[in-house]
Amino acid sequence: MAAVSGFAIVASLPAVALAQDTQPVTGGTLNVGFISDVRTLDPLQSSQWTERQILFLIFDTLLETEADFSLKPALAKSWEFSDDGKRVVLKLQEGVKFHDGTPFNAEAVKWNLDARLDPKGNSSQLKLLEGVKNVEVLDEFTVAIDMKEPYPPLLALFADRAGLMASPAAAKKYGSDVGSNPVGTGPFVFGEWVRGSRIALTKNDSYWQKGMPYLDGITFHDIPTNVVGIQRMAIGELDFISQLDPLDTRLSKASPDIELVPSKGGVWYSYQWRWDAEPYNKPELRQAIAHGLNRDRINQIIWAGQGKISDSFTPDGLWWTPTDLVHYEYDPEKASKIVADSGLKGTTIKLAAPSGDTLRRFAELAKEDLDAIGLNIELEPVPQSDYYAKAVSGEIRFTPMRWTQRADPDGLIHYLFSSKGTANSTGYKNDQVDKWIDEARVISDQARRKELYEKIQRQISADLPYMPVGFSVEFNAMRNTVKGFAPMPDEIPRFRYVWKTQA
Amino acid sequence: MLALVLSRIAIMVPNVIVLTFLLFTSVTSFLGTPAAIMLGENASPQSIAELNAKLGFDQPILSRYWNWISAALSGDLGRSYSTQQPVAQMIADALPLTLELASWAILIAFLGATLINSATFMKKLVDRLTAAVSIVGITVPNFFLGLLLIYLFSVQLRWLPTTGWSPWSRGAGQHLIHMILPVITLTTFYFSSFTLVYKAEYQSVKGSLYIQAARSKGLSEARISYRHILPNSILPLITYAGLSLGQLVGGAVVTETVFSMPGMGRLLVEAISSRDFPVMLSVGMVIIVGVMILNLVADVTYSLVNPLVRTSA
């Protein structure tokens, strides 16, 4: 009972109040349980979600993201745009050292960005940074970045993986083994990595931000399932687990020592199709699917009723989230009528999904709904490893899909809905929308951008390149000795601000 | 004896070639290509195609197999796609743990099944106990048994740690305490199947003439059981144990995953989930060669124990 009420209180408090409920104390090791798929701790190569929560401890970013996705200084203490927004000059913190004792300076920033931009380096961020033309060292602590065209969203990238600053000396020393020997400037120093068992970090005693971090160390323990994780948390072996789904939380509610904190945004789910190809290029078919999908039932079955149905691909609380999008009410009669009237009755369409995954359940539920309105859905399982590549290349024509939020609206909007977007897997192309997207990404006035992004999203919701479902709900579970945790919209726990009331 | 070993090794070489070829073709044909997973969600179809070409996925399968096996035979297992570590190093790190886990399990199961089931002085209790354990061991999946043991001994009773591993370097005591639950998990299946095989053989030997002769000489039941029946009924068990080593791999995969132990099984599971082909192939090859060597050892042991086989070879 205590855990249930704890959950209710935590859920209703804003993050700031949560963070201030006690004064930080120092010491102790935070034991985090995670279902590990960590492959590398080299920020230049990292592409897994789980890696980021560890990278954000060993490394610092140039800028940092706040809970509303606004930006604050970090290794870069200030920035200034010039040349009509095509050049940004970063002023860096002085006196910062990497864990190997080498200094952090403008040369190091240049090395980090150049290495990511080197086509031979295969960096996972190469594509994101393609707008960068040149990186120039102005003096020891000032660096200038020139872009091919104005691109304000660049700063948001510097608050994420692309802004994690690694030691150039360590890269040289370890070569291709640098992913197992990460050296950054962050509040924690890499300790040991026993693959398949644990990754241990220790406090950086000479961290440049005074008084930080509070913990002596953080250890990430591999767990086979969340069920085991919650059991280990109940007996005190673990302090924190993230990414619990609503079904997992039943177990943790039985323990009075465990608090549940819901995630901030959730992951966005939708059904998408090849907008430009038969038969999805028929607006009637898209309308019929939109009215034929019972989104509440999906929420009940997959998210235990705790997800949030949404007509938008951005969650509430972000500055670019619109309020008045086209709403497609669940109306199977109307959907059946559209199917019958437009001669689509009995049309066979293939619905692809990766095997053994939430997306497969999305596909199964859609089949039941859409068969009922007169369509003939054939489920098509795709190997997990091929799924994403096939979806992005457009080979898969109808599929449930999930995306996580980016710190700038351009991140997702240009990526998915510009006809030039690198992951425009729906083949969506609306010249007016293209023009608005190009316009919005190069202006820095937020009010004007908001106006444009609302227009863009309204048009997309009318054109229906996909049918939005909504946002999943996930929980972070932590022992009540853990303090200072605030959920972030990118779902990555920022353990650097956490402390424990008992060691 | 030497002739037996040499002839068996001569058969092993073509076997290894055929099996590794099957392994290679099945792994690289059915699991898709690794580039999409390696490049992550920001990858464009073009960069995925480029990386696949760089990794050699555009070449014919025979030449890819030849490149792999010839490098492997010269000792170069390549580098992991995902961790960039040398695969040989990763295997060298993981193998001792799995060997230790498997050795404990086989040793305890073998000794336990033969010694306990030969105990005549408390026959009723032993029979009931081993029947119960055998049913559990044969029917309950390892995964479930492991979770059950964690719940019982770690969560409820709090006698043992839930994480299954602590290296020797942190002290033998810690190491062995962490080994208990995984070893029980893996042993239960082997103890059960060994018990079933051993008991059947025990019964048939027990009825034979020389045992009756021994009994008529007035020897004690315990002496008859341990000195005469046990050595004679153990022979088929050695063969059976040799044959069940292949299953050990599956058991180790599951046990190491449940208890988060960094052994070969865990290495294989992680390699599969990230389509890390160099690791998958090398682990597969080590398993193939390892099982063959262990079968050979079982055969040699059998012929040492049973002089009949030795003379016929």
Image (spheres, rainbow, N blue to C red):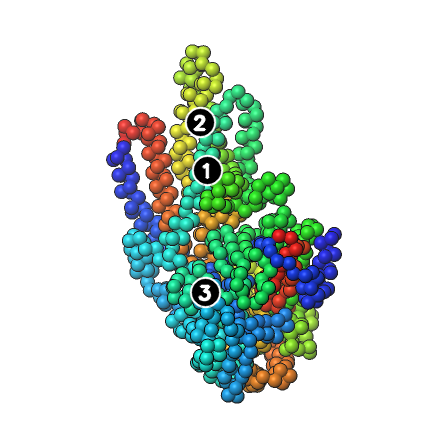
Q: State how far apart marks 3 and 1 are (Cα).
A: 45 Å
Label 1 packing within 10 angstroms: few (<14), some (14-19), many (20+): some
Q: Quadrant of residue B280?
A: bottom left
Residue named by callout 3: A101
| Residues flagged by tags 3 and 1 on a common chain | no
Respond whether the residues carrying marks 2 and 1 are from the same subunit.
Answer: yes
Q: Report the amino acid beneath label 2.
A: Glu
Give the residue at the far left of this rendering: B3
Please give the residue where the numbered disc 1 appears in the rendered image.
B104
Q: Earlier in the sequence, mark 2 or mark 1?
A: 1
- Label 3 or label 1, whichever lies nearer to me, is 3
Q: Is disc 2 surrounded by few (<14), some (14 to 19) or many (20+) residues within 10 Å?
A: some
**Up-down relation of residue B92 to residue A461 (above or below):** above
Residue B201 has which mark?
2
Q: Position of residue A322 (x, y in %)?
A: 66, 77
* Residue type highlighted by circle 3: Gly
SS of the residue at dot 2?
A: helix
Left/right of residue B47 with respect to residue A438 in the rendered view: left
Position of residue B269 measured from the top left corner of the image (x, y, whole percent):
47, 53
- Quadrant of res A187: bottom right
Protein chain holding label 2: B
Q: Give how far apart the Cα atoms at labels 2 and 1 are.
A: 24 Å
